[in-house]
Every structure is written in structure tokens, then in C-alpha cells.
Amino acid sequence: MVKVFGEQRAVDGVSLAVPRGAVYGVLGPNGAGKTTTIRMLATLLRPDGGSARIFGRDVVAEPTAVRSLIGVTGQYASVDEKLTATENLVIFSRLLGLSKADARSKSAELLEEFGLTEAASKPLENFSGGMRRRLDLAASLIARPPLLFLDEPTTGLDPRTRAQMWETIRRLVREGSTVLLTTQYLDEADQLADRIAVIDRGKVIADGTSDELKASVGLSALQLTLSDKAQIEQARTLVGEFLSRSAGRVVEATITPEAGRITAPLPDASVTTDILIRLREHDIRIDEINVAKPSLDEVFFALTGHGADDENDTERSAA
């Protein structure tokens, strides 16, 4: 899909295939085109190029049918702060065609499900940010749509509330929902998404599972912290020589002298035990060992040349 605002291409040929019954993460910095993509898929913006189908329904030719299949939770709560939680949910339910009795029943059910029963009669202006986000998500679930668009649903939430939202999203998928989740939080994509598309400057630059994306940018890293910092050069040489023989090429280990730590690329984690035996043979004691895959932050930097929290103003200025 393509979306152009003036001379700016906010979305420049994004192509996604979201599997049913999974969380599909769309990862990118502010302004990458994530929200514009969601708005086109949700029939809120008309694409300037390309096409999209949701459960076989064309988002341009069949917008009413598409809307019956989706729920949308945006970056900012769509609820009315002057009304109570119950009043908000009743209004949304009535707009979706429920009777007065069914609207009240559904509202009570959702408030209990999202832990908001005690606050049901309070105006939203007295709610915390996390409570607003939970109510907004509850509103999108009134009709229990098979596909949920969650556009940066945990932005601005404290760690505890973020964790609660994560568990809610996992539960929705266990119950059969499909979730398309946009986020700029790398750990969120890593924790929740079955597959991840990385978007930068309106284009999909990578697509795969978290492990596949990490594997695409390099090897795991072996980190060793020595008991005696005076042995660090000897240990670095031994580790480098061992890994070079194993890999059939020169492998350089680097050192952080003040921390007494050695870091080396690790082509095969199974050789870690052999390295430790080698160091013990030379009376080099290890205080700490860690084998780490590349982080999604390292993936994003390798793919784009900048971190995931760096901002691209294209989408913001277009809006």
C-alpha cells in the first residue's frame, strides 16, 4: 500500500501478510508509517496505491464489511473523559446495535474482565492512563471482532500496567483473536509477536520471527568476566585462538579492561564448554559467563543505521 501527503510518501509500498490466530508485530520508530498503515487497513484512510484484504474483504470496495470484522485501539483513548466507564461502554454498545439491556450487560461484563468494576461509575477524568487504555481496549472488544488493530497500546504506561496489557493481549489470542500490533518498544515486539515486520521511512525492510531477525544480523556473543583482571590479555588470546580454529578464520575477541570482561562472536554455542575447559587448563578463573543473541535493538540498528527510538518526522508532519 501507498499513502502520500503532499510530496511526502508516509507509506511507500508496505506489504504485509498477517496469519490468523497470531500476534503480528509492526515495529518502527515514530513517523515510520505504522499508524498510517493501520488507518488504511481500518478504512479510515483511502490508500493512494496498492490494495488490502481482511478475511477476503477489500478495504476500499467493501469498507462496511471490513469494519464488522475489526476492532481498533489507537494511540490515544477514544473514550469520553466526561462520562463514566459504564456510560462510555453503553454508548459504544448502542452504536453497534445492542439493545439497552444487552448494552448494560455487555458493559458490566467487559468492566469485570478488565478489572474496572470498582471504577465503573467514576468519570474518566479521574482515571489513570493505564485505566483509560484498558477501557479503550474493552470498547474495541464489544463486538468481539476476529481482528484487532492495536496501535501502540502501551505507550506511556508504567511497567506494571504494560505487563497487564501484555497478558490481556496474550489471552485474546488464546481465545481465537488475530492481533496486528504496532509498537516502537523492541521488548514488546520480542515478548508478544509471533512474527515481526520492521518498517522504516514507509517501507518494510525486514519480516520474520524474532529469532530469524536476530539471526539475520549476526552471531550470538560470548561474554566472560574474569576473577583476575590481570589475566584478561592471556584469556583474550586463548579465546580468540580457539574460536579462530573452530571457525577456520580469524575471530577477534574484544576486552573491556575496567570490567574484566571479554566479548567474542560465537558461531556455535556448543563450543562454550570447550572454551571454559581451555581457560581452566591455564588457571584462568571465570566469575560470570553469558551467551546472548543479538537484541532487537541491534537488529533495528543494523537494518536502518539508527536506533528504534530515533524519530522520523514524515508521518507526524503529514498528519
Image (cartoon, helix red, strand yellow):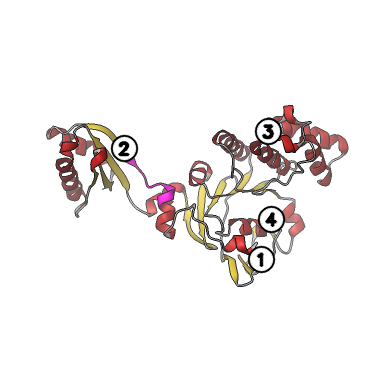
For marks 4 and 3, the one nearer the N-term is: 4
For the residue pair 180 and 270, the one nearer the viewer reads as 180
- Residue linked to disc 1: 47
Does residue 66 belong to the magenta stretch? Answer: no
The disc placed on residue 114 is 3
The three-letter amino acid code for the residue at tag 3 is Phe
In the rendered image, the residue lying farthest to the bottom is: 7
- Residue linked to disc 2: 290
**Image quadrant of residue 31?**
bottom right
For the residue pair 263 and 169, the one nearer the viewer reads as 263
Compute the Cα span from label 4 to label 1: 11 Å
The reply to whether dot 2 and dot 1 touch (C-beta < 8 Å) is no
Compute the Cα span from label 4 to label 3: 24 Å
**Image quadrant of residue 10?**
bottom right
For marks 3 and 2, the one nearer the N-term is: 3
Mark 1 residue crowding within 10 angstroms, few (<14) / some (14–19) / many (20+): many
